[in-house]
Image (tube, rainbow, N blue to C red):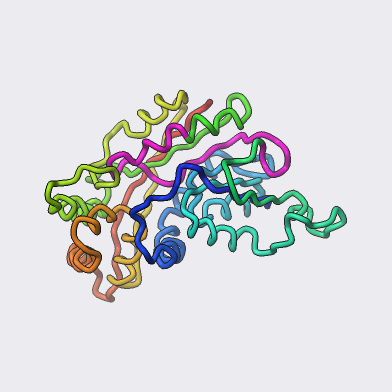
Amino acid sequence: MTPTLVRNQLGADASAPADAGTRARDWAEIQERMLAPLYEAVYDRMEIGAATRMLSLGCGSGLAMLVAAARGAHVTGVDSDRERLALARARLLPDAGWDDAPAHSPHPARRRARLVAEGGPAPVGADGAPYNLITVFEPIGCAAGDSEGLVPALRSAVPLAVRGATVVLTGWGPPERCATAAVLRVAARLADTARPPRTEPGRWRPTLRDDLEDVAARAGLKPDGSGRVSCPFGYADVGSAVRGLLSTGLFDAAVRATDRSQVEKEVAEALHPYRRDDGTVWMPNVFRYLVCVT
């Protein structure tokens, strides 16, 4: 495992709540694992291993990187959320001495690991080689404008990869295949209560069939296959479900239009159809990925 973490220059959302640290932990401890089947499906298809040098855009708190590193990949992560990135650093670089490990270190991976605290991604991967895989595991297609920052990020990342490198984009599946879409509609309805109604980026909107293909076209990528993966959202109770869902940022516009307590209340009510007799919450979802080449 040769992880590298850098901070994205796109800038964190200024509307992030004051308890950003709590929200980041909710993401890492509750919500991020819901996408694990997506990570595994992509890695199986890409045959991730020791020859893989992966750049993860929007790496979050690092679970996808950790899974890839466990398969032997060299991983580099970029994210604009400082709190999530700090959690990724704790997962992937728990030993502050990795960067300066001596050449005779008994852990070869530590000799190759780097941590770039500022700026964009390093010109090459942690082991000195260009990337051959770029992943975007932050699903798009569920909020207005959620791909606007992605296109320039991809255009900047592609020159750091080998010619013909693989790029994997991910997104929400059709609303009729995602039970969570019914709960996310609460976000749109509450955002519309603002006067005047807001149409700002981040407001929920139904996923469109060609969201991923549109991003690929604008970023100059050539589609080369796709797939769908079942990613059910399962929570221990309604409270955990509310915390996990709000950690995604998809309810931020609703919180700005009303207040957090109202959003939490209405999300909890919307979750009732998905509550089981034992108190757990279960929502079947389908996510989609698009494989592209540079």
Q: Nearer the viewer, residue 199 or 14?
A: 14
Q: Is 133 colored magenta in this rendering?
A: yes
For the question of whether residue 141 can be seen, the reply is yes
Q: In the shown orientation, is residue 192 left or right of residue 291?
A: left
Residue 286 rendering spot, x and y as whole percentages: 33, 47
Q: Residue at x 15, y 52 (%)?
A: 194
Residue 35 rendering spot, x and y as whole percentages: 42, 53
Q: Is 92 colored magenta in this rendering?
A: no
Q: In the shown orientation, is residue 114 left or right of residue 171?
A: right
Q: Residue at x 43, y 50 (%)?
A: 12
Give the magenta range: 124-152
Q: Residue at x 12, y 50 (%)?
A: 195
Up/down of 9 relative to 267, above or below: above
Q: Nearer the viewer, residue 195 or 180?
A: 195
Q: Nearer the viewer, residue 158 or 36?
A: 158
Residue 53, image quadrant: top right
Residue 89 rendering spot, x and y as whole percentages: 59, 59
Counting labels gives 0
| Residue positioned most to the bottom | 278
Residue 164 rendering spot, x and y as whole percentages: 58, 25
For the question of whether residue 273 can be seen, the reply is no
Q: Residue at x 63, y 54 (%)?
A: 70
| Residue positioned most to the right | 104
